[in-house]
Amino acid sequence: MNYSTVTVLATLLGAAWGSFLAAWLYRYGVGRTVVKGRSSCVTCQATLAWFELIPVISFLVLRGRCRRCKALLSVRYLVVEAATAIFFGVTAYFLASRGVVSWSWLVTGLVAVFFLSFIFFFELYYSIVWSGFLVIGMIGVLVGNMLLHIPFLGLIAGALVGGGFFFAQWLISDGRWVGEGDIFIGFFMGFLLGWQKLLLALFLAYVGGAFIAVLLLAAGWLKRKDKIQFGSFLAVSTWVAWLYGADIIGWYMTMMRS
Ligand SMILES: [Zn+2]
């Protein structure tokens, strides 16, 4: 398979997962299960036809409105579907452009971005992650990394440092600084990244988080007492560290030596 085929297929896969994730987010919010029942319009309850369920495209063709009652659909569907499609596509394109089109790399990357998009959006909208789902993710990325012959001890060290970092804060603050979900995110990050890239991801999340918080405060979009969805920053920084971690660490080492 060439470059563009891989990228297009990954983008479509991302859009399909995004469609499911958007429905999951919506149903979580109203206390329904995501595995049962067809999707329906929130306003008129009409069951959606297959052609109304095509990620991104349906939303654009219907101009964001229900076909029957013309009620506005939540723009969240479009945002989640488009974002996951982009996350998946960029990940595949990145691997392909570096000549790493082996199945193990591709599958590990897509499994990683699958769980990272879950973390990103659930943290963003509800400040929550389902830890049981993240445990599946930890097993997934660990198996992927084993297939890639990434040293096992480095991954275990990463998980202990990542999980331990948040667990210690959780313990000291009695759960006020970080939530239990952050501990699971820390473990997941470590199993995916290994200890070196994990440290980079934590650094990027704190620096990026502080930078964006200052911008939002200055713009008046954020009040001092508002909570920042730190888990979403962790998801993005983990993605960046997975893709560019080796480059950034290499560049830093060269800088230190000269
Ligand atoms: Zn409707």
Image (cartoon, rainbow, N blue to C red):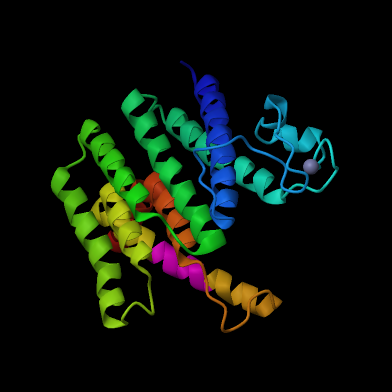
The segment highlighted magenta reads 203-210
Judged from the image, the quadrant occupied by ligand 1 is top right
User: Residue at horizontal 43%, vertical 64%?
Assistant: 205
Which quarter of the picture shows residue 196? bottom left
- Using residue 150 as the reference point, say whether residue 41 is left or right of it: right
Q: Work out whether 121 lies above or below 11.
A: below
Q: How many marks?
A: 0
User: Residue at horizontal 57%, vertical 36%?
Assistant: 37
Q: Work out whether 256 lies above or below 79.
A: below
User: 52 or 59, which lies in front?
Assistant: 52
- Using residue 206 as the reference point, say whether residue 55 is left or right of it: right
- Using residue 178 as the reference point, say whether residue 77 is left or right of it: right
Residue 152 showing in the rendered view: yes
Q: Name the spot of residue 43 as percent of width and height, x first.
A: 76, 48
Residue 85 showing in the rendered view: no
Q: Is residue 207 magenta?
A: yes
Q: Name the spot of residue 95 as percent of width and height, x first.
A: 43, 32
Which quarter of the picture shows residue 159? bottom left
Most extreme residue toward the top is 1
Q: Main secondary structure of the magenta part?
A: helix
Q: Is residue 82 magenta?
A: no
Q: Name the spot of residue 99 as percent of width and height, x first.
A: 40, 26
User: Residue at horizontal 75%, vertical 47%?
Assistant: 73
User: 240 or 234, which lies in front?
Assistant: 234
Q: Name the spot of residue 169 as percent of width and height, x first.
A: 30, 76
* Quadrant location, the C terminus: bottom left
- Using residue 247 as the reference point, say whether residue 229 is left or right of it: right
